[in-house]
Image: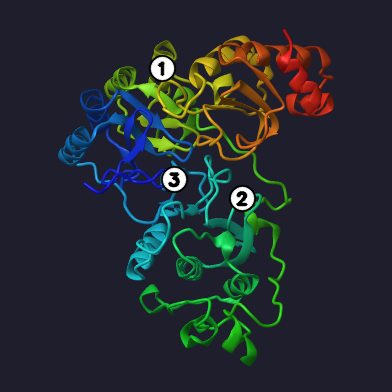
Amino acid sequence: MNAFSRRGACPALSAPMQTGDGLLVRLNPVAGGLSPGSLIGLGESALRHGNGIMEVTARGSLQIRGLTAESARLLAAEVDALGVAVRTGVPVELGPLAGIDPQELADPRPLAQRLRAAIEEAGLTARLGPKVSVIVDGGGQLAMDALTADVRLKVVRAGGEFLWSVSVGGDSRSARPLALVDGDAARDIAAAALRMVAEKGREAHTRDLSERQLASLASWHSFAPPSVLPDISPTREEIGSFAAGSPSGADPHFATSAIGETGGDSSISPQVGEMSGRTEGGAVERQRSPVGLFDLANDHALGIGLPFGSMPAQPLIELVGQALQLGSTEIRMAPSRALLFLGLSSSACASLQASAATLGFVTSPADPRTRIVACPGAPACASGRIATRAIAETIATESADLFDSSITLHISGCAKGCAHPGAAALTLIGDENGAGLVVDGTAKALPAGYRPGYDAARGVAGIATAIRSARHPGETAAACLARLGAAGVAELYRRN
């Protein structure tokens, strides 16, 4: 067993991470999903060796909490005995319905496999940091637009054919578009970008690449096999001089200096709107919730959410057991903290959905719990200053009408903001002063007002009451919050 990984690393089965409630492991099945029997076995292992809490993360990974050094070893042995192969190396992530969604533009799995092979052949796994990731998105009912990645490949329809949009950094809205190419070129550009990141060290990401490096990637449409990709370095300039993968339309100057950090300014040519994951009209596709019913070619998938991404193993075992009896053949983890049960008839989906609701799972995309992100908090996490999930449950029950699709509430046990690093419309943060409120910011921001931690839900209820009375017809909750202003919202939170 490797030494316990530092916070911020990825807690793989071979390198669990120390948290406030013990060791944590994260599992990503190689096959993409698990058989019902395997997931039941993992739940039973979580009860035997951990604290019985299982989680699905925002990126669709399965986590088991509360392990010790010895029980983590026993868990690893049982995972092997169940025949569950887990992914290692640089994460190359696919949509949860990859390869089985009739609405996909292309099956992303072959390209993802070729890219994984290129990464391994180049020896990049040990040279890249644990948070470096790639997304290969074939589109369909559950796109990956909301997830950030260092490199994202997304299939688009262009001129009557399907090509791959290559972009770097951010989500589909904020990523930097590079090129619109076929699958082989997309793989080569992605591998080249990761080599450049590796040259900058294990703390680097594609956001750290220079303008000249990005320009060279945007211009390079290589068809070279991954085994002969050049060893790209910020100072060795091979990308332009590599004969088999020279940039299209390159001039002699580019061939000798395209990759260098110095020299003349080189900007990336404008790309079509589709390259950043946008539709032909330029609008970003609305992200569909993974909770609900999805039509497949011959049957259905049912998405069921875990409240705040977490559930005790016993109800999860019960739900999966019922799914098995109803004919489910596979269960896939989905981004936004959900499970997709595959192979079900319409009547089986209705029956399983009713059982899930009884067991406390999230069964509707309109459930206010889908708009609340809450880390484990106190007492599960040693850093937590407030009982985040108890507060979240109270808010979801008492202030449900606050949460339309425009609002996200983040409840963080401390200022690290592990569960939601980005900004949220409202953020509650636990610290030595109680539960602080940040309006339109992150957990690292200075709170504008405080309440005692045990009373935080009542403060949010005050905000919900004000929105209820001040909201204009057709106005979103977020727009109403903006009208009330950060100072006014903070005052509503502090009252009484």
Q: Say which amino acid is labelled 2.
A: Ser
Residue 352 percent coordinates (x, y): 39, 19
* Residue annotated with mark 1: 356
Q: Residues within 10 Å of mark 1 (few under 14, many from 20)?
A: many
Answer left or right for 238 relative to 442. left
Q: Nearer the viewer, mark 1 or mark 2?
A: 2
Residue 105 or 215: which is nearer the viewer?
215
Distance from label 1 to label 3 (Cα)?
Answer: 33 Å
Which amino acid lies under the numbered mark 1 shown in the image of this protein? Ala
Q: Nearer the viewer, residue 125 or 247?
A: 125
Is 145 above or below relative to 453?
below
Q: CA distance from mark 3 to mark 2?
A: 23 Å
Q: Residues within 10 Å of mark 3 (few under 14, many from 20)?
A: few
- Name the N-terminal-most of marks 3 and 2: 3
Disc 1 from disc 2: Cα separation: 32 Å
| Residue 282 point in image, percent of width and height | 73, 51
What residue occupies the far front of the structure in this picture?
Answer: 432
Q: Residue furthest top?
A: 496
Badge 1 vs badge 2, beta-carbon distance below 8 Å: no
| Label 1: which secondary element | helix
Residue 411 relative to residue 14: left or right: right
Image side of residue 116 versus residue 442, left or right: left
Mark 1 or 3 closer to N-term? 3
Q: Give amino acid for label 3.
A: Gly
Q: Earlier in the sequence, mark 1 or mark 2?
A: 2
Checking the image for residue 172, the label placed there is 2
Q: Which residue is mark 3?
A: 8
- In which image quadrant can residue 202 be found? bottom left
Residue at horizontal 42 percent and vertical 10 percent from the top? 358
